Image (spheres, grey):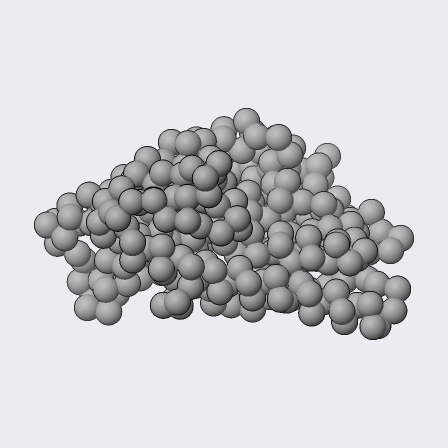
Amino acid sequence: MGGRVRIALYARTEADADAAAFAAFDAVADVDAAMSDYKEDSELSRFNRRSGQGDVAVSAPLMEVLQSARRFSALSGGAFDVTVGPAVQLWRRARKEGHLPDAEDLRATLGRVGWNRLRLDPARGTARLDREGMRLDLGAIAKGYACDRALRALQARGVRRALVDAEGDLALGDPPPERASWRVRIAGEPDKTLLLARCGVATSGDAERYVEVGGRRFSHIVDPRTGLGLETRSQVTVVAPDGMSADALATALSVLGAEKGIALAESLQGTEAWMKWKEGERTRTAMTRGLSALVDPAEAGGAERR
Ligand code: AMP
Ligand code: MG
């Protein structure tokens, strides 16, 4: 799926730590082998090649991610949508060719996008994409899931004080010995160190990943309603009960924007969000009511200090 995974853990002995870490990295490798869309032989790629051909048996991990993806699609009114694959491909091509996709291409692409056309039958362990040419892209959810699986692998070996970090998507277990929490700093925000444990946290944003076409700057996050990359420049951090939820929600909130995004986060148990975006020359921020309780007061400056 691209990127590195880093694990911090506390175990009784070095041998215990090594064994647990190897198991956790194996879990990450399994998720990558199943859900990467860069690998031709991943389960995901094989599934995509069978779009429009009826039910396909899927592994339990893939089913788990697809069920969660559908849940976040429904919750976000379709802003989060793992069927954006064809639109993501269109954008990758636009970047290479240096011009925007034409209206015709865009229309054809949107006809192959739509989370309601991803059908799941968890009881039978099958899934299908209703139309030929549909294509799943799990780039907005699978990294968080990989972190969760790594954390579970550690916990299964008795290692509970651990943190898994996949470059912006994190899963956190119990805190380090004699500490109440892990310290997670929001990139570019020196006064926002979050004090967290037993949860997921993820950041989505276009700080580094964007496409510049015709002088316009588009995010790698696509609005499934238009098929276009987002033009708003934003950074979204979400804390949620697990890494997969945080990952999916950070992407969903990026598409929804502040008003709807914060409202969605407020409606979910154990979920907090912080958003920053550009409006002309101004930088604006918004957050859920519970977020400030997670910020380290020792480092919170000015308005944050109450
Ligand atoms: P993230 O960095 O977690 O926000 O994920 C962004 C990646 O998810 C993109 O690079 C695409 O592969 C994919 N993606 C883009 N737009 C969406 C969307 N609206 N819903 C779900 N996945 C998306
Ligand atoms: Mg995401």
Q: Quadrant of residue 49?
A: bottom left
Whether residue 121 is visible, yes or no, is yes
Residue drawn at (22%, 49%), measured in percent from left and top? 132
In the picture, measured across the screen, residue 50 lies left or right of residue 77, that is left
29 versus 290 height, above or below: below
Residue at 75%, 65% (x, y): give it: 20
Percent x, y of residue 103: 12, 49
Q: Is residue 122 left or right of residue 288?
A: left
- Quarter in which the C terminus is drawn: top right
Residue drawn at x 58%, y 33% as measured from the top left: 288
At 69% from the left edge and 65% from the top edge, which residue is drawn? Answer: 23
Residue 59 at x, y percent in the picture: 49, 52
Q: Nearer the viewer, residue 291 or 38?
A: 38
Q: Position of residue 98 (x, y in %)?
A: 20, 67
Relative depth, front residue between 264 and 231: 264
Q: Nearer the viewer, residue 148 or 42?
A: 42
Q: Which residue lies most toward the front here?
A: 124
